[in-house]
Amino acid sequence: MWSQFWKPGTEKARILEDEEGSVIFLSNSLSSSSSSSSEKQRQRLPVYKYRNAILYLVETNGTTIIVGETGSGKSTQIPQYLIEAGWGHGGRLIGCTQPRRLAVQAVASRVAQEMGVQLGEQVGYTIRFEDVTKPDVTVLKFLTDGVLLREMMDDPLLTKYSVIMVDEAHERSISTDILLGLLKKIQRRRPELRLIIASATIEAKSMSDFFRMRKKCREPENENSRLQLEPAILSVEGRSFNVQINYAEEPVQDYVQAVVSTVLSIHERESTGDVLVFLTGQDDIDAAIHLLNEEVQNNGKRSSGLVLLPLYSGLPRAEQELVFSPTPRGKRKVVISTNIAETSLTLEGIVYVVDSGFSKQRFYNPVSDIENLVVAPISRASARQRAGRAGRVRPGKCYRLYTEEYFLNQMPNDGIPEIQRSNLVSCVIQLKALGIDNILGFDWPASPSPEAMIRALEVLYSLGVLDDDAKLTSPIGFQVSEIPLDPMIAKMIIASNQFGCSEEIITIAAVLSIQSIWISGRGIQKESDEAKLRFAAAEGDHVTFLNVYKGFLQSNKSSQWCHKNYVNYQGMRKVIEVRQQLKRIAHRIGIVLKSCESDMQAVRKAVTAGFFANACSLEPYSHNGMYKTLRGSQEVYIHPSSVLFRVNPKWVIYNSLVSTDRQYMRNVITVDPSCLLEAAPHFYQLQQSNPLF
DNA sequence: GAGCACTGC
């Protein structure tokens, strides 16, 4: 049945060059004689018109960039076209990446269903903890871009793959950017590898510049010289409804207040349909809900029938799921959300969107080595994405709480790629492990600042992961690069081997790698604080985690036990998974699993070996618990969620900083100054004004 | 006295 379709090398489609030199295809008529209804449905997707064009471009161009709006069907259809065209023949694999696990699973099962095959046979997927593929049977593999990066450590040229499609490239996650940089390198060594970069925005031109092969790579008489060096760009329309955009007439002073009045006016004036509001974080969201609730009480008529639902990642799972429940008859659902609804979650039935124009974004300061979370204006690309959420079921409306003038003339066109806003230690070690020696010269889709790179190299050097020539050390550097966690955590795990506490440390590492093991929230603060005290250890949060883990195991991993103790059950399950993975890796890199029983001194020493750079001392005579970091004399405080909050020991080490109005240390453990010197003499002796002396 | 969102052999 597939024989009617065009195959590589069998016939040529028509191509036109436009004035910019990129390639546009004029679709020719397609015969469609399939009878299955699923096949019919596939043919109704907008991307179907471009099937032959896409296959022709992939055949003739090293890189094809596909701009597809939501609903175009690109993620599910293009991989199937590639199979139909034979790119999976002869033991070759077609790989399709997504930034998120959930998306990988969803797209893979959808495609398997459309093809009428069992998931895990011809069509499979791989995400962390889950490999649903069968060697030599699977020809189409969906995976997260992070997993593909890990695969490159074993097979740097990705020799098994004939085509790799990188989906959602416009999101510009760190993994996607590293992957794009590496794929470009691979392409020079393996011109037969085809890349498809799928993106939702028209930023395609800069992507195209990035993937353009330089002339000197071309060998005139090479058999590959027929291959186009210029990436092709093809744009596929989406299938969504018109969204009418309304702007604020004047700049908005207080966007929470503006959200409240906009929601009320939508409710008063507009026909039925749910509302999605984008705010920045839990504080804003709770404030808006509080104000709207007040309105309901004071002015029942105007606001009756509103169902107000908050949505953010920290919300317990059950409450998150409420936003998916159908709206009761005669009511209007108002979901007030963070950015989670912009990319990660899709809500059905939204007709009205209210866009505050802001989100919380991470920024990294390489001088202080601190990542900050700040409220910042979103980009035009984000604003369009938010507005698009209103047009999924029928024509909708978007209310932007900023002026049109601002949108057109002041709003940045695109967001700053994550790699330019982050600490780069993990990223640098991954490149080093792949044998990229000249990190500063690496060809990125968007280059991080040299300061951030140099800071990352310094941190890795101080951890003993890189040597004087910035090469991975043996064995520590190679071991650290094998562990899929922050290098400081990885170093802590490796150090636990010599202190005989690897069992405890991998538990701690697993807990530190999830958001939080505690359930908290506004109504239950007192209860959850009391529950926390039942596990609290004098050494600090890390040892407290060991107590929680022990209790969880003794309860037979019971969800009721978690509920009773205000422990996050989903989180604990994740801890068990991560812990199992770490056990396998530890075994592989030669770490002996051993428990130190009750010797918490060993645990503190191992933590210190990884996190000595995060040591702080309490300011003498400080009445408000102010600490200063030993390294940079930064002012920091113990986070109120820590068991050491208000205990304020003289010397502590923190796992991470969160900055709001103050810098808060999250996950804190006490430390002896002598251990610090022992763990990192090179690090602390260099500093003259050192309080340790 | 307080937490944008993702991710990884």
Image: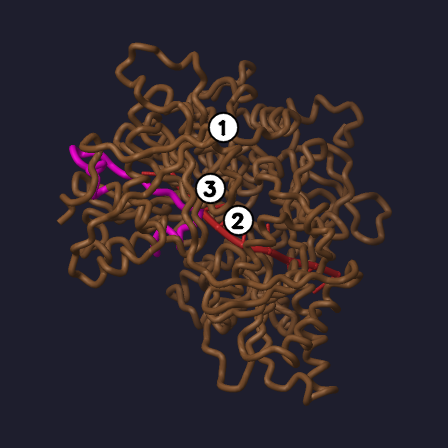
Judge the density around disc 3: few (<14), some (14-19), many (≥20) Cα neighbours within 10 Å: many
Seen at 41% across and 60% down, the residue is A553
Q: Which residues are magenta?
A: A83-106
Residue pointed to by mark 2: A512
Judge if badges 2 and 3 mark residues of a common chain.
yes
Chain assignment, label 3: A
Residues A339 and A245: in front is A245
Foreground mark, 1 or 2, reads 1
Q: Which residue is mark 1?
A: A210
State the residue at coordinates (56%, 40%).
A607
Colour in which the image shows chain B: red
Return the residue nearer the eye: A632 or A399.
Answer: A399
| Residue A381 place in picture, x, y as percent | 58, 48
Q: Chain of mark 2?
A: A
Identify the residue at horizontal 65%, vertical 64% (top origin): A399
**Which amino acid type is shown beneath numbered disc 2?**
Leu
Which of the pair A313/A207 is nearer the observer? Answer: A207
